[in-house]
Image: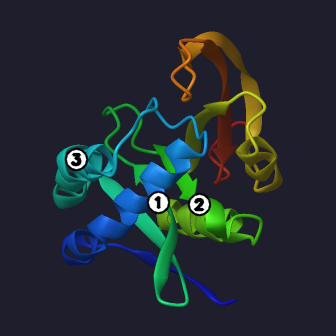
Amino acid sequence: MGVSIEALDVEAFDAALPALAEVLQACVAGGASVNFVCPFSLEEARAFFLDKVRPAVVAGHRVVLAAWVDGEIVGTVQLACDTPPNQPHRADVTKLLVHPKARRRGIGRHLMEALHEAARARGRSLLTLDTLVGDAAEPLYVSVGYRRVGPIPGYSLAPDGSGRLDATMIMYCPLGERVPLE
């Protein structure tokens, strides 16, 4: 299995839109807590990428990476670089998604490593993210250099549509020497 990671320019993003939407919809249906609640349709996933992500890609504020295996997009992650003027060194990691059929093959790690390279290339030395407490991605984040800040209880609705409130874990990753570790 060869994994290739590609940063999507606007043209490539437009071509990849159906596959990106399919990955998002499959992940949410599989229980991923990535801001959406079931039921969550393929059309809603497409609208998210088209209405929320594409304008940021066009403006140069967001990097979308796609993971390809055997000519098919099986994962994605985003680097949000639209930060305030006093935070030009920082970016947010959003929507690390690996299709349920492609999990446990190192694709998430490949995406995160490529995301770190993309961040460094843009002069970003501190990355932040939040993830569901106890989520399978949390150990991955720790293994690629993220540190836990702590949980926030009752942060978001559970993706299963039950109405339960879940906790999120705030994490950060220093990529450069300018970032104090404590």
Near mark 2 (Cα within 10 A), the count class, few <14, some 14-19 or many ≥20, is many
Q: Which residue is mark 1?
A: 23
Q: Is residue 161 left or right of residue 167?
A: left
Residue 115 in percent (x, y) is at 54, 63
Quarter of the image holding residue 44? Answer: top left
Specify the label residue 47 is tagged with: 3
Quote the CA–CA distance across marks 2 and 1. 7 Å
Q: How did the renderer colour the structure?
A: rainbow
Left or right, residue 79 beside residue 17: right
Q: Residue at x 56, y 17 (%)?
A: 162
User: Quarter holding the C terminus?
Assistant: top right
Asked if the residues shown at circle 2 and circle 1 are in contact, with their CB atoms under 8 angstroms apart, the answer is yes
Nearest the viewer among 3 and 90 is 3
Q: CA distance from mark 1 to mark 3?
A: 13 Å
- Which quarter of the rendering shows the N terminus? bottom right
Horizontally, is 62 left or right of 120 in the view? left
Q: Amino acid at mark 1?
A: Val
